[in-house]
Image (cartoon, rainbow, N blue to C red):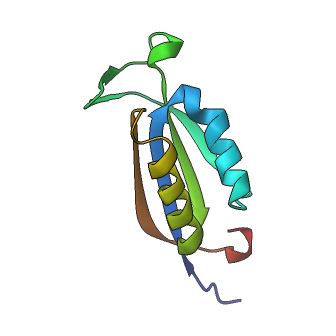
Amino acid sequence: MTIQPTLRKLLTIVCEAELENSLLREFAHHGVTGYTITEARGHGAHGTRDAAWPASANIRIEVLCEERVALEIVESLQEKFYQNFGMVSFLSDVQVLRPEKF
């Protein structure tokens, strides 16, 4: 059996933890069926986010999907959240080994 990697996009979003439910609704709207969420800490334009208390918590969300879906999500995030929340998102090319899942 020969493994054939398939190109997908890895959309990574680091944002305020309070946005989690809103982002999950956004993902569902765009047909995303899976994601990974982890706690995140760091420092940037919005200061230090050390997660010492819930109001200063950040999360990192990763979504593997087709490029079209990733770009639609990023556009929606820009329109709805970038102005008023600490959020950064970026895209990476990745090769997946089970493309039917993404």
Which residue reaches farthest bottom?
Answer: 2
> Is residue 99 found left or right of 83 in the rendered image?
right
Instruction: Examine the rendered structure and indicate whether residue 60 appears above or below residue 8.
Output: above
Residue at 61% across, 86% down: 4
On the question of residue 44 being in view, the answer is: yes
Q: Quadrant of the C terminus?
A: bottom right
Residue at 44% across, 17% down: 56
Residue placed most toward the observer, 28 or 52: 28
Quarter in which the N terminus is drawn? bottom right
**x and y, in percent, of residue 5 in the image:** 57, 81
Residue 33: quarter of image: bottom right
Give the residue displayed 39% in from the left and 27% down from the top: 41
| In the displayed structure image, the side of residue 101 where residue 47 appears, left or right | left
Side of 35 where 61 appears, left or right: left
Give the side of residue 89 with respect to residue 100, left or right.
left
Q: Is residue 81 above or below residue 65?
A: above
Residue 34 visible from this viewpoint: no
Q: Residue at x 64, y 38 (%)?
A: 22
The foreground one among 52 and 21 is: 21
Question: Which one is in front, 100 or 22?
Answer: 22
Q: Position of residue 59 (x, y in %)?
A: 51, 33
Label total for image: 0
Q: Is residue 8 above or below residue 84?
A: below
User: Which residue extends farthest top?
Assistant: 53
Residue 23's spot in the image, x, y percent?
61, 42
Is residue 49 shown above or below 27? above
